[in-house]
Amino acid sequence: MHGRLGSAELIGENLRDPLTLRLAEAVEPVEDPALSAQFPAQRFARVQIETVDGKLYELDETTARWEPSHPPTDEELLEKFRWLAGARLSEPATAEIEERLWNCASLPDIQALIEIL
């Protein structure tokens, strides 16, 4: 519906959007004990979609992105940070926080980071 799921999609008017509400009513989460037993070491999901005309589409045991065994690249991580922070902060504020976070090992203490948050 929105192409992405971030903070903007989870607050305000988006939660009252008729299409969002219709989709939420059509979703039925069901726990699979066999998959849950593997958590938190591994995070699996199984998806089944049944259309109104009875067709069934399935995706079996897919893993979440960015598992410890397949961490994000630096560029993927920066892209996600910029997207999420940019939804709430100005571009200069986002850039300043990014710079301090990316170089936090060289900060004398955490106060330099806390000040900008």
Image: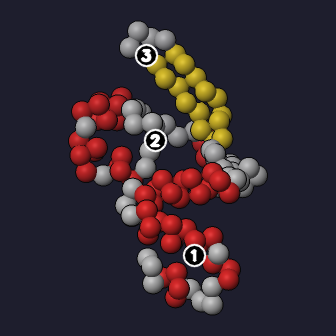
Q: Position of residue 15 (x, y in %)?
A: 28, 44
**In this rendering, position of residue 103 left or right of residue 84:** right
Q: Contact (CB < 8 A) between labels 2 and 3?
A: no
In this view, the residue farthest toward the top is 53
User: Can you identify the residue that label 1 sits on?
Assistant: 100
Which amino acid type is marked by label 3?
Thr
- Name the residue: 43% across, 58% down: 86
Mark 3 and mark 1: Cα distance apart in space? 48 Å
Mark 2 element type: loop
- Name the residue: 49% across, 37% down: 30
**In this rendering, position of residue 15 left or right of residue 53:** left
Mark 3 element type: loop
Count neighbours of disc 3 (C-alpha within 10 A) and say few if under 14, some if 14 to 19, many if 20 or more: few
**In this rendering, position of residue 16 left or right of residue 82:** left
Q: Position of residue 32 (x, y in %)?
A: 57, 38
Q: Which badge, 3 or 1, is on the more N-terminal residue?
A: 3
User: Can you identify the residue that label 2 sits on?
Assistant: 4
**Quick check: 100 above or below 77?**
below
- Name the residue: 56% across, 53% down: 79
Q: Does residue 41 appear in this view?
A: no
Q: Position of residue 38 (x, y in %)?
A: 68, 48
Which amino acid type is marked by label 1?
Arg
- Name the residue: 60% across, 42% down: 33
Mark 1 element type: helix
Mark 2 and mark 1: Cα distance apart in space? 26 Å
Count neighbours of disc 2 (C-alpha within 10 A) and say few if under 14, some if 14 to 19, many if 20 or more: few
Mark 2 and mark 3: Cα distance apart in space? 22 Å
